[in-house]
Image (cartoon, helix red, strand yellow):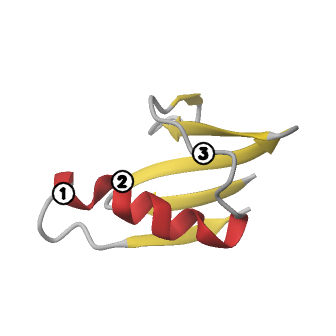
Amino acid sequence: MSRYNAFGRILAIEREGEVWQAYAIGADGKRSPAGFVVPDFVEEAEIAQYLFDLFHESAVPGKGDVRRIGE
């Protein structure tokens, strides 16, 4: 599982079989379904760019970018 900070949202993306699962990480550290889909054809190295493309229009000014923050 990889974690990302996407414009202030903490997300975990995990490959489960042939599909990606996306989870939102709450302030308490618990994860819940993120409410979006990462297509199966997206490679792991492309996830940060995919998240940027998905969320950049709803980003709050000053909340940064998309970056991987851990496994």
Left or right placement of residue 4 versus residue 14 in this view: left
Q: What residue type is labelled 3?
A: Pro
> Is 1 drawn above or below residue 71 in the view shown?
above
Q: Position of residue 37 (x, y in %)?
A: 53, 37
* Residue for badge 3: 39
Q: Where is residue 21 in the image (x, y as percent from the top left)?
A: 66, 37
| Badge 2 vs badge 1, beta-carbon distance below 8 Å | no
Secondary structure found at label 2: helix
Q: Residue at left 26%, top 61%?
A: 56
* Residue for badge 2: 54
Q: Residue at left 59%, top 32%?
A: 31
Cα separation between marks 3 and 2: 12 Å
Q: Earlier in the sequence, mark 3 or mark 1?
A: 3
Q: Give the numbered dot on residue 47.
A: none
Left or right placement of residue 38 versus residue 44 in this view: left
Q: Where is residue 71 in the image (x, y as percent from the top left)?
A: 74, 62
Q: What residue type is labelled 2?
A: Leu
Q: Kindly report which numbered mark, 3 or 2, lies closer to the viewer in this rendering.
A: 3
* Residue for badge 1: 57
